[in-house]
Image (tube, grey):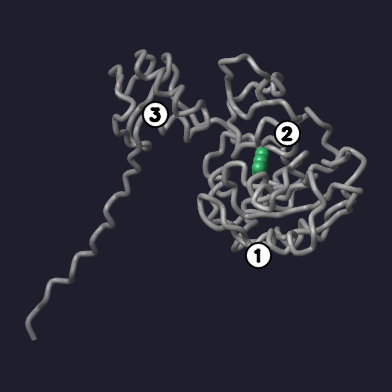
Amino acid sequence: MKYRKPEKKRKPPQQHVLKTLDRIFSKAGICSRTEAREWIVRGRVKVNGKTQRDPEHWVDVDQDAIVLDGRPLRAEKKIHILLYKPKGYLTTYKDPEGRPTVYDLLQKLDQWVFPVGRLDQDTSGLLILTNDTDFAEHITNPDYHVAKTYLVKTSTLLSDEQLEMLRQGLELKDGPTRPAKVRRMRDSESRSFIEITITEGRNRQVRRMVEALDSKVLKLVRVAIGPIRIERLQIGKWRHMTQDEVRVLRRSGRKGAGPVESAAKRAPAAEGGDSGAVSE
Ligand code: URA
C-alpha cells in the first residue's frame, strides 16, 4: 500500500470582529452613536496611535488599540434602569424647546444610558434606560414579541365588540396590529378603563388602536414590560434592575416564559396606589 501523508488539520480561520468606529463606542455603552461621531470628527479618538476622524472607519475590536482623549477604551459596566416616567416628560436627550426630558430625572446617574423604546410625552409609566444595546434590541425588536402592558382610560364607553376588535387586531395605516390581550377593568358612566398587552411597539400604537374604534385615549400608563411591573416604584423615580429582572426580561418574549399571559394574570386592580393606576 502506498504511504499517504496524513491530512493536515486546518486551523479554523480566525474570527475578526470588525465594526465601524462610532459603533464601537455605542456598543461599549459609553455614549450614543451620534455623540461618538462628534467626538471622532473632532479628533478626540486615536486608532493604533493615529488620530482617526472618520466615524465609518473599520476597526478590529480585539486587535486595534482605540484611545479616547488619551485613555484606552474599555467597555463600561452594563447598567439597566427602571424609571417611572411622569406625564409631560419627553423621551429624548435634549429638547430644543427646553421641555423636561427623562434625563432630568436621572441626574444622580453618572453613566450614559439611552431609553429602550419611547413613551409619548402624555404617557406615563415604565421606561427602561440602559447602555446595553443587545438587551435593548431584545425588548424593542417586535420579532421577540416582548409584551408591553398599558392601562388605558378611553373617552367613550367601549362595548364588548370593540374590546374584541382590539383583541383580534385592527387595521392601522402602517398595517394590521397583532392580536392583543385586553381586559375590561371597569366602566364609569361614560368612560372605559381597560388593560391592554401588545407585543409590538409602533409609534403611538395604543392611541391609534383606540382611535380606530372612534374613541380617544384620555390617559395612558405603561404598567409592565414583559413580566416586570411598576409595583412600588414612585412616579418620577428610578431604580436599578436586579440581575434576576434583567435575566428574566432577556428570556421573555416568544421563546421565553410567556410574559403576555403572566402580566395579565398578575395585573393589580386598575385604580389606586402607585402601581400605574389610571384614575379619573
Ligand atoms: N402607545 C402609545 O400610543 N403611546 C405610548 O406612549 C406607548 C404606547
Rendered view: 109 above or below 6: above
Q: Earlier in the sequence, mark 2 or mark 1?
A: 2
Residue at numbered disc 1: 168
**Mark-to-mark CA distance, 3 and 1:** 42 Å
Quadrant of picture, ligand 1: top right
Q: Position of residue 255 (x, y in %)?
A: 59, 63
Q: Secondary structure at mark 1?
A: helix
Q: Callout 2, which amino acid?
A: Leu
Q: Callout 1, which amino acid?
A: Gln
Mark carried by residue 22: 3
Q: Position of residue 84 (x, y in %)?
A: 76, 34
Query: Which part of the image, by quadrant, shows the N terminus?
Result: bottom left
Q: Secondary structure at mark 2?
A: strand
**Mark-to-mark CA distance, 3 and 2:** 27 Å
Using the image as rendered, state which of residue 121 and residue 155 is in the foreground.
Answer: 155
Residue at numbered disc 2: 83
Query: Which part of the image, by quadrant, shows the C terminus?
Result: top right
Q: Earlier in the sequence, mark 3 or mark 1?
A: 3
Cβ–Cβ under 8 Å for marks 2 and 1 = no
